[in-house]
């Protein structure tokens, strides 16, 4: 069920296209938090749902011995684009079997915020479809030769951050979940307390209110969940995406890339993943 907060945020995003702009997403140089290291092999994990082929994007280092911990990456509402694929490759360079999940099918990448809102809102309106699609991706990962299905985590950006939190709320299959500047309230509350949470937010992000933050913390505390909430000073919405600054200027809205917050949040995530996979 979509909450009034989500409706308001989606309306704002339609007007401003706040996460990123497509031409900027395809620039490999846009990822500044870490270079891609090692020999990286990529592959597609295909599954059919209601006649649509979902083609998740996996990457790993074949030179590493044995099975590798799995990290799912849930994309912004633009779809499984080059920005997310490069994040997947970065994680592969860190020694993980990383998987960018194809929410829309056929690795569809949308061109307009109106289309992005239309497709992404489906998963807020019918969360069971998000769960069904994600479970299908998980099943394909369980069949992958290099994946360690007993060690899984999930991260997400913007729309993907909210979806990542939802998957952790609904399933205890994961060791941990990481949200980068995602919304915190989606109408779904935590049903287990076995998953550790890392939530990284821009302290100056007007799209995530103090009320929403307080409600999220209350939810976590009430469910006795092990979580860490980090607010990065002066960081606006979409602070990990270098394309946000140009969009902020173009549309005269308070969004911007923050190099310091990007690098610190990425390093925070690296420590978090290392600890949960011990």
Image (cartoon, rainbow, N blue to C red):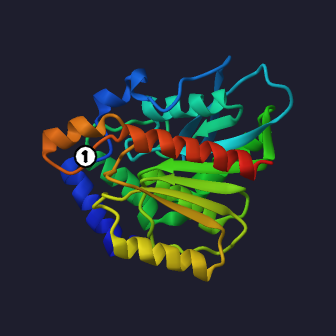
- Of all residues, the one furthest to the top in this rendering is 39
Q: How many marks?
A: 1
- SS at circle 1: loop
Q: Residues within 10 Å of mark 1 (few under 14, many from 20)?
A: many
Q: Residue at x 65, y 50 (%)?
A: 272
Q: Observer-nearest residue: 123 or 251?
A: 251
Residue appearing at x 16%, y 40% in the figure:
249
Please, is residue 169 above or below residue 146 in the view? Answer: below
Q: Is residue 86 visible?
A: yes
Residue at horizontal 48 percent and vertical 73 percent from the top? 216
Quadrant position of residue 221? bottom right
Q: At 38% from the left edge and 25% from the top edge, which residue is drawn? A: 26
- Judged left or right of residue 250, residue 137 is right
Tell me where residue 167 appears, x and y as whole percent.
59, 60
Q: Quarter holding the N terminus?
A: bottom left
Residue 151 placement, left or right of 81: right
Q: Nearer the viewer, residue 202 or 185?
A: 202
Residue that badge 1 annotates: 17
Where residue 121 sits: x, y (%)? 37, 59
Residue most extreme to the right: 66
- Residue 79 percent location from the top left of the image: 42, 41
Q: Is residue 81 visible?
A: no
Q: Position of residue 136 (x, y in %)?
A: 65, 49
Q: Where 15 falls versus 20 (above or below)?
A: below
């Amino acid at each position: 069920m979509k909450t009034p907060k989500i409706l308001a945020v989606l309306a704002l995003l339609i007007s401003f296209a706040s996460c990123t702009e497509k031409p900027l997403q395809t620039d490999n140089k846009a990822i500044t938090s870490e270079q891609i290291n090692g020999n990286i092999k990529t592959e597609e994990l295909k599954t059919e749902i209601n006649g649509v082929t979902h083609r998740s994007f996996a990457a790993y280092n074949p030179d590493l011995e044995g099975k590798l911990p799995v990290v799912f990456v849930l994309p912004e509402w633009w779809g499984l684009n080059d920005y997310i694929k490069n994040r997947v490759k970065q994680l592969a360079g860190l020694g993980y079997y990383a998987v960018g999940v194809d929410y829309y099918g056929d690795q569809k990448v949308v061109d307009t915020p109106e289309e992005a809102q239309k497709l992404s809102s489906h998963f807020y309106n019918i969360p069971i479809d998000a769960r069904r699609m994600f479970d299908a991706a998980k099943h394909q990962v369980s069949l992958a030769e290099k994946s360690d299905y007993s060690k899984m985590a999930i991260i997400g950006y913007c729309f993907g951050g909210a979806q990542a939190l939802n998957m952790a709320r609904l399933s205890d299959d994961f060791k941990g979940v990481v949200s980068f500047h995602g919304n915190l309230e989606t109408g779904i509350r935590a049903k287990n307390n076995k998953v550790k949470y890392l939530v990284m937010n821009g302290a100056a992000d007007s799209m995530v209110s103090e009320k929403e933050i307080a409600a999220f913390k209350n939810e976590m505390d009430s469910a006795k969940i092990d979580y860490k909430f980090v607010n990065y000073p002066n960081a606006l919405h979409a602070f990990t995406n270098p394309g946000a600054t140009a969009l902020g200027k173009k549309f005269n809205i308070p969004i911007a890339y923050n190099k310091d917050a990007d690098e610190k949040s990425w390093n925070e995530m690296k420590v978090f993943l290392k600890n949960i996979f011990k």
